[in-house]
Amino acid sequence: MMIREKILSPKKLLLQIRKLKRKKIVFTNGCFDILHAGHVTYLERARKLGDVLIIALNTDASTERLKGPTRPINRLEDRSKVIAALESVTYVTWFDEDTPLALIQKILPDFLVKGGDYEPKSIVGYQDVVSNGGKVKVLPFLEGRSTTKIIERSQRK
């Protein structure tokens, strides 16, 4: 599949999902501002949980609200293309709200996945996914990999 075919507006993504019969859908979200080995490893692990991996990216405005006025480093269009280029990723979409809850409630994936040390019940969309028969998983981060640390290292003099 070509990169541009993997990047879908939320509305087009929902139409595409309706065509996926009996496929296990895995959903995750984030800024994915500067892609690094930790992200790639995380997304490969997430994809192994199902047949389709959907990544919902924070828009530029959402990223700025979440991370501060100096972020994102890379704009949504560029982040979308880079994430879509990964073999593990099936579709990329975006959300402008502070959380992807509305999108999760529409997709109701089989697996809702986050990286790090979250408590599953604290993950946005947990109740919606679980009550629909899905599972919420926390995948460990690759030690020592962080966009914030990469930015900090690049700014050292």
Image (cartoon, rainbow, N blue to C red):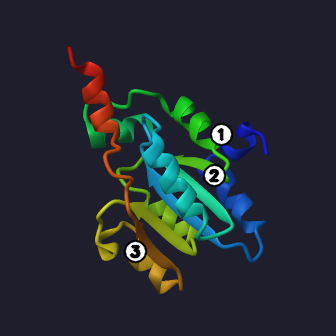
Q: In which quarter of the image is the N terminus?
A: top right
Labels 3 and 1 touching (C-beta < 8 A): no
Residue at 37%, 42% in the rendered image: 62
What secondary structure is found at the residue carrying circle 1? loop
Q: The residue under label 3 is which amino acid type? A: Tyr
Helix or strand or loop: what does disc 2 sit on? loop
- Which circle marks residue 126 in the picture? 3
Q: Name the residue under label 1.
A: 85
Q: Residue at x 36, y 39 (%)?
A: 63
Q: How many labels does the image show?
A: 3
- State the separation of the CA atoms marked 3 and 1: 28 Å
Amino acid identity at mark 2: Val
Q: In the rendering, at what x and y percent does residue 73 appear? A: 39, 27
Return the residue found at the far front.
143
What residue does disc 2 label? 89
Q: Tell me if label 2 and label 1 are in contact, CB under 8 Å.
A: yes
Residue at 46% from the left image edge and 65% from the top image edge: 113
| Left or right of residue 83, residue 114 in this image | left
Q: Which of 76 and 43 is in front in this view?
A: 43
Sequence-first tag of 2 and 3: 2
User: Gap between marks 2 and 1, in whole Å?
Assistant: 8 Å
